[in-house]
């Protein structure tokens, strides 16, 4: 059970509950000033690199494949840390990609199915698709302290290709100091790549997170590889119950599905307006 809880803490880090979801963001109100902050929104190139990292096969070592080949686990050594990168792929024919994406986002439902979570809240909203959040997870084992994270999280949907991505990495934030009774864990990279399939969806989960503290690196690598598939299975089971649950719990409340343009699309629009303005001036 100790191993499971350590792994659960790591896997939980990318899904911080944000109080931003208790209200709609209006205009630029409550937005971080991205010109004067170090918390820079993820770019389209960042998401493309994450997708490539998920789908590449070189330098990955297969650690587990289930009987029907619908679940696979790989590991990879990385120069950022002695902690291995773990990659898990699952084919989920019974769950659509939009539903799986909603399950990963919905903070109210997270509180229903994640018994490990202690607390989760928004620290700073960067824009409609990027924020900094806090997440903490309990450990029922007396010798293992609870863990918490302060992560910058970003998400992107490519509807035309049926692709949904959520990525995060840990950051330091003045409004998110270390708390007594918790060991501040660190996510080097954690994320989901969900893709629409002929039937249901496929989900790729990648994580490289260090729980820190006294736990040996060898134990962390072994535990994460062994128990992460169980946690993915837990997520899939939660997803099967989401539609029914959501129908009676704020069914129209899904602010993570914003209609606002991504910041790189804003730039294109500004450039187009500028070009149109220059053309108009030329005619005048």
Image (tube, rainbow, N blue to C red):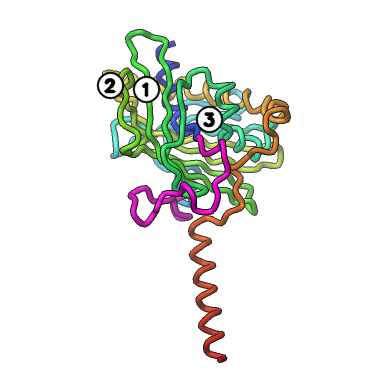
Q: Which residue is mark 2?
A: 213
Residue shown at the point (34%, 13%) measured from the top left: 144
Instruction: Describe residue 7's horizontal placement relative to residue 112 as left or right.
Output: left
- Magenta residue check for 26: yes
For the question of whether residue 57 can be seen, the reply is no
User: How many numbered dots are placed on residues in this image?
Assistant: 3
- Give yes or no for contact between labels 1 and 2 (Cβ–Cβ under 8 Å): yes
Looking at this view, is 81 or 267 the one in front?
267
Few, some or many residues within 10 Å of mark 1 (<14, 14–19, 20+)? many
Q: Which residue is mark 1?
A: 147
Few, some or many residues within 10 Å of mark 3 (<14, 14–19, 20+)? some
Looking at this view, is 31 or 75 the one in front?
31
Q: CA distance from mark 1 to mark 2?
A: 9 Å
Residue shown at the point (43%, 21%) measured from the top left: 137
Judge depth for marks 2 and 3 and give the one in front.
2
| Vertical position of residue 3 compared to residue 209: above or below | above
Q: CA distance from mark 2 to mark 3?
A: 29 Å
Element assignment for label 3: strand
- Magenta residue check for 21: yes
Expressed as whole percent of the image width and height from the top left, the position of residue 143 reads: 32, 9
Q: Which residue is mark 3?
A: 72
Q: CA distance from mark 3 to mark 1?
A: 27 Å
Furthest residue in direction left, as rendered: 214
Looking at this view, is 111 or 95 the one in front?
111
Where's the N terminus, which quadrant? top left
Write the start and end of the magenta stretch as one range: 19-47
For the question of whether residue 90 can be seen, the reply is yes
Expressed as whole percent of the image width and height from the top left, the position of residue 142 reads: 35, 8
Where's the C terminus, which quadrant? bottom right
């Amino acid at each position: 059970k100790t191993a499971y809880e350590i792994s659960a803490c790591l896997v939980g880090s990318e899904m911080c509950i944000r109080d931003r979801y208790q209200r709609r963001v209006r205009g630029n109100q409550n937005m971080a000033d991205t010109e004067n902050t170090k918390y820079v929104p993820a770019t389209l190139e960042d998401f493309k690199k994450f997708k490539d990292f998920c789908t590449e096969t070189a330098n990955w070592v297969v650690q587990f494949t289930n009987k029907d080949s619908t679940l696979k686990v790989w590991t990879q050594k990385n120069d950022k840390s002695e902690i291995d990168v773990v990659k898990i792929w699952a084919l989920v024919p019974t769950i659509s990609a939009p539903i799986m994406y909603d399950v990963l986002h919905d903070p109210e439902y997270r509180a229903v199915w994640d018994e490990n979570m202690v607390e989760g809240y928004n620290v700073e909203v960067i824009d409609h698709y990027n924020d900094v959040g806090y997440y903490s997870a309990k450990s029922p084992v007396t010798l293992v302290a609870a863990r918490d994270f302060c992560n910058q999280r970003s998400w992107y949907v490519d509807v035309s290709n049926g692709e949904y991505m959520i990525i995060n990495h840990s950051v330091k934030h003045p409004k998110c100091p270390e708390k007594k009774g918790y060991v501040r864990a660190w996510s080097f990279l954690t994320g989901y790549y969900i893709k629409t399939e002929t039937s249901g969806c496929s989900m790729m989960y990648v994580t490289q997170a260090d729980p820190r503290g006294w736990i040996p690196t060898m134990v962390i690598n072994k535990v994460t590889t062994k128990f992460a598939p169980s946690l993915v299975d837990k997520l899939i089971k939660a997803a099967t119950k989401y539609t029914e649950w959501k129908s009676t719990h704020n069914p129209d409340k899904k602010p993570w599905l914003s209609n606002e343009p991504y910041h790189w699309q804003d730039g294109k629009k500004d450039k187009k307006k500028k070009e149109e303005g220059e053309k108009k001036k030329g005619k005048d």
